[in-house]
Image (cartoon, coloured by chain):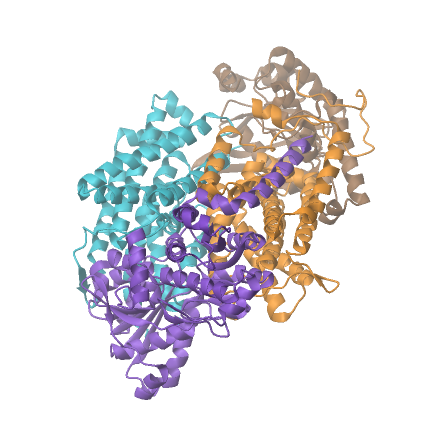
């Protein structure tokens, strides 16, 4: 398959390292040669969606449970942050931290009853959860200000210097957060936790019989995913500065899911590239904007049909990276043996 | 290993986005909205050539796709009518007007992105109709404020909207103004027991709250009792529970606080149960579609609007004729507001003699223009002072009920 | 005393009695076979031993500890690991990752360690990786650790499943029809492999249809029929036991079915 | 609930009456979800938008002056085809693949749901369009309570539909095939059941039920619009799962429970909480009995 060929170009570690550096340089210097704030905002927005995709990737990609509740966790994080920030004058970073934790708690509360469910049961449960969160936001007026929403939400302030979209501050905050989230995803993926999730996706019963406590692992994954989504919500709120119950819609959850499917379940690079393309295309191809949800829908269908592992997901052919100090007799260090002959 | 794709995509995006911003203002011509701007540009090509200057560009941002598309489209129609009219009369300072339109899908993040796009485009000197829902408008408003670009909303209803900054204008009845009219209606239709059915939206909540305060203040003088308050959420089609509450409180008049498409559904379900009670609508219910949808069910209901398409006032007549000629449909209040906005900005530009964003803002507080809303001017908050007229739905059309409304003080005194 | 003692174990699904008061024991270092026609309840017994099903009656004592109706994790921790009649490998994971999952419970570090890559994380990961490598090399899969489980030939996948079970540091391995679908030479290889593991100190309880294998490998054999234990003893005794022969009429096509 | 509003037993009863009405609306949609699941063990997430498409087709034919009956029949054929096409073009290829797990099917269905819904928006516009109610015989007052005659029709039809579907599934050979497929596709195939045709038939049938539901619901509310399937669909799905998805009468009961509790929630807490009721109940039930009220538990196969 041609696509496969394109996607599996092997390049030496050194080249890819240089490429990575260049990429970093480009990303960091973006604000200095941008044609306008619009560009920065879109870039920040893409970053936020990348974080969201990475968060969903932990439940859906690693653990194989399709969740439509990501927007709800965003809402929890965003509201907690906004309430603390506007009504109790808590600064960005502490408020953001609390926002994450509350979102995590919400994840736990939803996770406990639903972790036994799978497939569409889980989808409907998470969809329902979003509806519940919306209703709470609408009715708990003393806290959330009901349908009037919360305005003038604060931006991060570092050493008395307010980080706005204009001065690129929000972009850099996003960049740092994204880096952190990428690290978290990577750290999980390459640990026994990540392996366990992967095993659960493959065969829950078998992993259970190998001694993996599948339920606790699933809940933990769900909680972490919720926390990250909550943090994305915080970023979103401090960027738009106004949130109301209708801000976080099921459409958002669908877009996030779409990014995960498109980028490739389990792949970290995939999430970022997925966000890049799927969020920027309605901006670039404005005439397509009307049809964007049709496009998102088609992407879901076509990916499932022709490349369920997504653009960059699925099996790689890199040798497995062994921890340092592991000895292999009858085997000279170097490229692994690929494919059984 | 696949990092190469990474950077490839990243660069692709960088390029694409830059080109995206570059073209998007003109690329509007790709979709419905701005093809109009294109053709009215061409329509006056000759005029433009003799006034050998590039046109003055104004932005329209509103939902052109999605659930609220028709509201955004109506506003755009109004803008286009005004632009054509002004250009036919030689434009502003001999320069043509040109409207660039953006779709915000009535979604906050898209609205903000569009706003940034407009702000960063130095050729655009003001936003002539900014967004539809308050919730969306309030995400973009701070951006206009910071960037120092005047933005007039034809529809925002959130009480605190215009207080966001001095660059933020609203050419729509403020909530207080709506209350003045809405509060008189039960008395006018002399009801004994009033029921309120309201959507749980920013407008709905603060409206009901404001209404209650007025009611509590004048309880003893009023001839009626506020018997029922019934709420529903956006997207509801089944009003049975609300209907039951109203009927149970045997109200003889109902104030319905939401857009016309909700009222249509409510009215149809309500009439099945109770054919008599008087339905009272707000301005957002004034829409020809209402009658097409609900037909018999809304016959005899009363409501008010800032625009009376059948009015003999020349300004209105002129606008309505042009609008009907161009789109062969009746304009609604949002179209009229958007139309007026363009005239306000045009007047400000004439006044200051420049297209400087800040100067336009300052001028907007001073100019007074005769347009569909009569003598239109903005007060210190940036809210327009507008007057509404009452309508009654009679055999399938909105019929004006002349001078039904009193000035507030007279009304209170008259109780 | 016995490593595994099963007494009066019973399980019924609705009306159907799948396992009826079965009792047997397995001693340290033995290879014991559990045979019987299809539907005799062999796999059900495995499921009861590993905690997939809850027993209605009876007791399971392993290594002196009561493990009846314990959670699957506790049972694995106690030292029982199993393979499956129809392979249940983690298909789109690499060979080594499959084995590492086996070692999951013995890889000890917290979320904090994995997020900040502490020394504890690194040593623990290195340790279990080394263990996995050793196991894989001991069974001749040293060159295939990078490959994906489902890309391996059938015979190898069988072995890999056993390796995964071994990685849990189990004392007792429950092998559910390890020779199913293998040709003669593969079976021979498997036989030696299992014997080798016995030498390495594993105790093995296996379900098998391939009489040839059973007779050559088992120290003792238990025969089940319709959920009841009908005979037990050395392979020889079993071979000439009339009840067994009777129960096994029609064994041939069972065998084919499983193949 | 706002203190002003007058309460009392009469209102409670009226709300319960309304609840039953709405309940049957949910039920008739829920049955569609159950039908597919009962046969194929697939949660057909796209059903909501198939329902929406059906409603729009009917309206299209009516505005083309076809008359109600031919319009509905033509729509049944068309929508049935859409539903079959969905299976043919998207689900069947997944079934043939080894990796054709629940997840891929699920996501495909979600995707198709979005495509259809937004196609409706593009083709017919996003606004609410009025729909003629031909099954309205005015409101009937019994003992001071208002019953909408359309409701009786809906109730009647849903019960009849339930009976017909049950008959098809339990009383005919095709139904026998369906159940065989549900039990074990391979075996059914060996036993000479034409699996492909059975599945196609099932999807066509669900298309038809979608149209019936669409017709009744749009007549009841006299409205048609692209997002009509969103809330209704997810609540109906919740009802189906609540009653034990795959069990038809379970779905109906689930719908009734949701409908009644919704209206009661309006009585006790006001309109604001209504939308969440369905899902709160659902989460509650799943917590206690993951298979739903009537669902049977399957034993883990090792």
Rendering quarter of residue D181: top left
The percent coordinates of residue C75 (x first, y second) are: 65, 40
Most extreme residue toward the front is: B50
Using the rendered image of the protein, determine whether residue A262 is visible from the camera's viewpoint: yes
| Picture colour for chain D | cyan
Rendering quarter of residue A96: bottom right
Q: Which residue is located at x 36 percent, y 62 percent?
A: B336
For the N terminus of chain B, which image quadrant? top right
Q: Nearer the viewer, residue A326 or A80?
A: A80
Most extreme residue toward the top is: C185
Relative to residue B199, is residue A45 depicted above or below? above
Q: From the viewer's perspective, tell me whether residue D272 is left or right of residue A253.
A: left
The percent coordinates of residue D1 (x first, y second) are: 40, 70
The percent coordinates of residue B407 (x first, y second) are: 34, 81
Rendering quarter of residue D36: top left
Q: From the viewer's perspective, tell me whether residue D291 is left or right of residue C218.
A: left
The percent coordinates of residue B259 (x first, y second) are: 35, 62
Q: Nearer the viewer, residue B141 or C69?
A: B141
Using the rendered image of the protein, determine whether residue D11 is visible from the camera's viewpoint: no
Q: From the viewer's perspective, tell me whether residue D23 is left or right of residue A298.
A: left
Q: Nearer the viewer, residue A50 or B159?
A: B159
For the C terminus of chain B, which image quadrant? bottom left
Chain seen in brown = C
| Picture colour for chain A | orange
Report the number of discs: 0
Chain seen in purple = B
């Amino acid at each position: 398959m041609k696509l496969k060929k394109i996607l599996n170009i092997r390049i030496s570690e050194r080249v890819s390292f240089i490429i990575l550096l260049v990429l970093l340089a480009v990303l960091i210097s973006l604000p200095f040669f941008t044609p306008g704030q619009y560009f920065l905002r879109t870039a920040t927005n893409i970053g936020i969606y990348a974080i969201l995709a990475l968060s969903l990737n932990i439940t859906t990609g690693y653990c194989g449970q399709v969740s439509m509740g990501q927007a709800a966790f965003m809402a929890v994080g965003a509201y907690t942050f906004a309430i603390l920030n506007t009504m109790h004058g808590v600064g960005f970073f502490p408020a953001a931290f609390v926002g994450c934790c509350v979102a995590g708690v919400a994840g736990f509360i939803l996770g406990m009853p639903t972790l036994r469910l799978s497939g569409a049961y889980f989808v409907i449960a998470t969809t329902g959860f979003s509806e519940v969160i919306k209703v709470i936001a609408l009715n708990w007026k003393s806290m959330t200000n009901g349908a009037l929403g919360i305005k003038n939400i604060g931006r991060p302030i570092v050493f008395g210097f307010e980080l706005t979209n204009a001065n690129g501050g929000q972009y850099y905050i996003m960049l740092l957060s994204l880096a952190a989230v990428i690290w978290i995803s990577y750290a999980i993926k390459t640990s026994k936790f990540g392996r366990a999730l992967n095993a659960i996706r493959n065969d829950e019963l078998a992993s259970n019989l190998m001694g993996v406590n599948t339920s606790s692992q699933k809940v933990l994954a769900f909680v972490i995913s919720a926390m990250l989504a909550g943090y994305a919500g915080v970023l979103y709120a401090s960027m738009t500065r106004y949130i109301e119950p209708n801000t976080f819609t099921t459409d958002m959850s669908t877009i996030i899911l779409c990014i995960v499917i498109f980028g490739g379940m389990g792949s970290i690079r995939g999430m970022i590239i997925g966000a890049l393309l799927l969020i920027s295309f309605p901006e670039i191809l404005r005439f397509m904007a009307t049809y964007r949800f049709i496009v998102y829908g088609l992407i879901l269908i076509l990916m499932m049909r022709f490349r369920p592992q997504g653009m960059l997901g699925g099996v790689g052919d890199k040798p497995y990276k062994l921890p340092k100090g592991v000895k292999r007799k009858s085997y000279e260090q170097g490229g692994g043996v690929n494919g059984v002959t | 290993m696949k990092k190469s794709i990474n950077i490839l995509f990243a660069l692709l995006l960088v390029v694409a986005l830059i080109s995206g911003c570059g073209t998007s203002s003109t690329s509007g011509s790709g979709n419905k909205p701005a093809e109009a701007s294109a053709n009215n540009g061409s329509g006056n090509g000759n005029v433009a050539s003799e006034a050998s200057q590039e046109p003055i560009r104004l932005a329209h941002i509103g939902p052109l796709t999605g659930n609220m598309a028709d509201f955004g489209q109506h506003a755009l129609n109004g803008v286009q009518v005004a632009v054509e009219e002004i250009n036919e009369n030689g434009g502003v300072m001999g320069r043509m007007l040109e409207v660039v339109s953006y779709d915000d899908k009535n979604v906050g993040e898209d609205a903000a992105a569009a706003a940034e796009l407009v702000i960063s485009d130095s050729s655009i000197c003001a936003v002539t109709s900014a967004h539809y829902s308050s919730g969306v408008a309030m995400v973009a408003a701070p951006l206009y404020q910071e960037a120092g670009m005047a933005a007039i909303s034809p529809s925002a209803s959130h009480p605190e909207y215009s207080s966001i900054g001095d660059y933020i204008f609203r050419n729509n009845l403020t909530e207080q103004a709506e209350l003045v009219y809405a509060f008189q209606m039960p008395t006018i239709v002399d009801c004994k027991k009033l029921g309120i059915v309201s959507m749980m939206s920013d407008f709905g909540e603060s409206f009901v709250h404001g209404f209650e305060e007025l009611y509590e203040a004048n309880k003893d003088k009023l001839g009626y009792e506020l018997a029922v308050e019934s709420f529903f959420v956006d997207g509801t089609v089944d009003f049975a529970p609300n209907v039951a509450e109203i009927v149970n409180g045997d109200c003889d008049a109902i104030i319905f606080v939401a857009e016309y498409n909700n009222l249509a559904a409510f009215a149809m379900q309500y009439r099945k149960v109770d054919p008599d009670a008087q339905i009272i609508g707000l301005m957002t219910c004034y829409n020809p579609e209402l009658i097409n949808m609900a037909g018999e069910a809304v016959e005899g209901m009363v409501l008010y609007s800032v625009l009376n398409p059948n009015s003999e006032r020349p300004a209105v007549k002129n606008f309505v004729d042009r609008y009907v000629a161009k789109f062969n449909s009746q304009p609604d209040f949002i179209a009229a507001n958007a139309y007026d906005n363009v005239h306000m900005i045009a007047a400000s530009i004439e006044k200051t003699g420049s297209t400087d964003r800040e100067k336009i803002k300052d001028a907007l507080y001073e100019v007074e223009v005769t347009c569909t809303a009569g003598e239109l001017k903005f007060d210190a908050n940036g809210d327009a002072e507008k007057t509404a007229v009452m309508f009654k739905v009679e055999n399938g059309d909105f019929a004006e009920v002349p001078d039904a409304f009193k000035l507030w003080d007279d009304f209170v005194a008259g109780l | 005393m016995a490593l595994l003692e099963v007494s009066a174990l019973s399980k019924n699904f609705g009306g159907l009695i799948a396992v009826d008061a079965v009792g047997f024991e397995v001693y340290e270092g033995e290879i014991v076979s559990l045979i019987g026609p299809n539907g005799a309840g062999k796999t059900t017994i495995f499921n009861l031993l590993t905690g997939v099903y809850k027993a209605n009656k009876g007791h399971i004592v392993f290594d002196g500890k009561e493990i009846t109706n314990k959670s699957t994790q506790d049972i694995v921790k106690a030292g029982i690991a199993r393979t499956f009649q129809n392979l249940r490998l983690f298909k789109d994971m690499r060979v080594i990752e499959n084995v590492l999952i086996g070692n999951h419970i013995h890889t000890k570090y917290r979320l904090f360690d994995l997020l900040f890559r502490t020394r504890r994380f690194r040593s623990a990961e290195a340790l279990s990786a080394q263990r996995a490598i050793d196991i894989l090399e001991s069974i001749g899969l040293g060159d295939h650790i990078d490959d994906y489980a489902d890309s391996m030939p059938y015979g190898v996948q069988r072995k890999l499943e056993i390796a995964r079970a071994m990685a849990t540091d189990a004392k007792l391995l429950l092998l559910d029809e390890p020779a199913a679908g293998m040709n003669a030479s593969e079976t021979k290889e498997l036989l030696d492999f299992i014997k080798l593991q016995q030498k390495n100190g594993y105790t093995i309880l296996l379900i098998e249809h391939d009489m040839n294998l059973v007779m050559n490998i088992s120290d003792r054999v238990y025969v089940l029929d319709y959920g009841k234990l009908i005979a037990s003893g050395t392979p020889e005794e079993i071979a000439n036991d009339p009840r067994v022969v009777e129960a096994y009429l029609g064994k041939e096509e069972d065998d084919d079915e499983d193949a | 609930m706002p203190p002003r509003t007058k309460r009392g037993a009469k209102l409670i009863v009226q709300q319960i009456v309304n609840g039953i009405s709405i309940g049957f609306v949910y039920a008739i949609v829920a049955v569609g979800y159950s039908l597919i699941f009962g046969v194929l063990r697939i949660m057909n997430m796209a059903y909501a938008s198939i329902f929406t498409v059906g409603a729009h087709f009917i309206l299209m034919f009516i505005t083309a002056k076809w008359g109600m009956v031919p319009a509905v029949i033509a729509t049944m054929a068309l929508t049935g085809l859409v539903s079959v096409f969905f299976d043919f073009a998207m689900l069947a290829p997944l079934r043939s693949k080894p990796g054709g797990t629940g997840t891929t099917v699920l996501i495909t269905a979600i995707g198709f749901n979005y495509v259809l819904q937004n196609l409706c928006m593009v083709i017919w516009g996003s606004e609410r369009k009025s729909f003629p109610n031909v099954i309205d015989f005015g409101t009937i007052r019994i003992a001071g309570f208002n019953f909408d005659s359309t409701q009786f029709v809906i109730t009647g039809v849903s019960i009849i539909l339930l009976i017909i579907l049950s008959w098809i599934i339990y009383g005919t050979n095709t139904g026998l095939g369906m159940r065989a497929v549900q039990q074990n596709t391979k075996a059914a195939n060996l036993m000479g059941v034409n699996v492909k045709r059975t599945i196609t038939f099932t999807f066509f049938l669900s298309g038809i039920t979608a149209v019936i539901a669409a017709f009744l619901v749009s007549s009841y509310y006299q409205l048609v619009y692209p997002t009509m399937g969103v809330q209704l669909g997810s609540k109906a799905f919740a009802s189906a799962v609540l009653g034990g998805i795959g069990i038809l009468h379970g779905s109906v009961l689930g719908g009734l429970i949701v409908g009644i509790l919704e209206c009661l929630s309006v009585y006790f807490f006001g309109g604001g909480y209504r939308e969440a009721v369905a899902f709160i109940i659902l989460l509650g039930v799943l917590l206690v009995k993951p298979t739903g009220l009537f669902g049977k538990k399957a034993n883990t196969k090792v």
